[in-house]
Amino acid sequence: MTKNEKVKFCIEQLEFLYPEIPIPLDHKDPYTLLIAVLMSAQSTDV
């Protein structure tokens, strides 16, 4: 099994096990999701 085949197999298994993962952060496009992730990471820093 080549490296590419292993990667493809892993991705297929993850997609089978977790077909749709809800994202708890409020966003409307990839850019606002990125900003939400950055803001949430900063808000948990002490």
Image (cartoon, grey):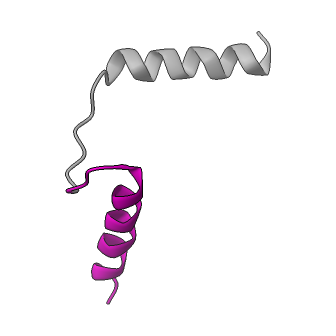
Relative height, residue 12 to residue 20 (above, below): above
* Location of residue 24 in the rendering, given as x and y in whole percent from the top left corner: 19, 51
Q: In the image, what residue occupies the spot 31% across and 65% down?
A: 36
Depth check, front residue: 32 or 5: 32
Q: Which range is magenta?
A: 26-46
- Residue furthest toward the bottom? 46
Query: In the shown orientation, is residue 33 left or right of residue 4?
Result: left
Q: Is residue 2 magenta?
A: no
Number of labelled discs? 0
Depth check, front residue: 31 or 10: 31
Quadrant of the snapshot with the N terminus: top right
Q: In the image, what residue occupies the spot 41% across and 60% down?
A: 34
Relative height, residue 8 to residue 30 (above, below): above
Classify residue 40 by image quadrant: bottom left
Relative height, residue 7 to residue 31 (above, below): above
Q: In the image, what residue occupies the spot 34% across and 56% down?
A: 33
Q: In the image, what residue occupies the spot 27% across and 34% down?
A: 21
Query: In the shown orientation, is residue 32 left or right of residue 12?
Result: left
Q: Main secondary structure of the magenta part?
A: helix
Depth check, front residue: 31 or 42: 31
Q: Is residue 28 magenta?
A: yes
* Location of residue 12 in the rendering, given as x and y in whole percent from the top left corner: 49, 15
Quadrant of the snapshot with the C terminus: bottom left
Query: In the shown orientation, is residue 6 left or right of residue 40?
Result: right
Classify residue 23 by image quadrant: top left
* Location of residue 45 in the rendering, given as x and y in whole percent from the top left corner: 34, 84
- Residue furthest toward the right? 2
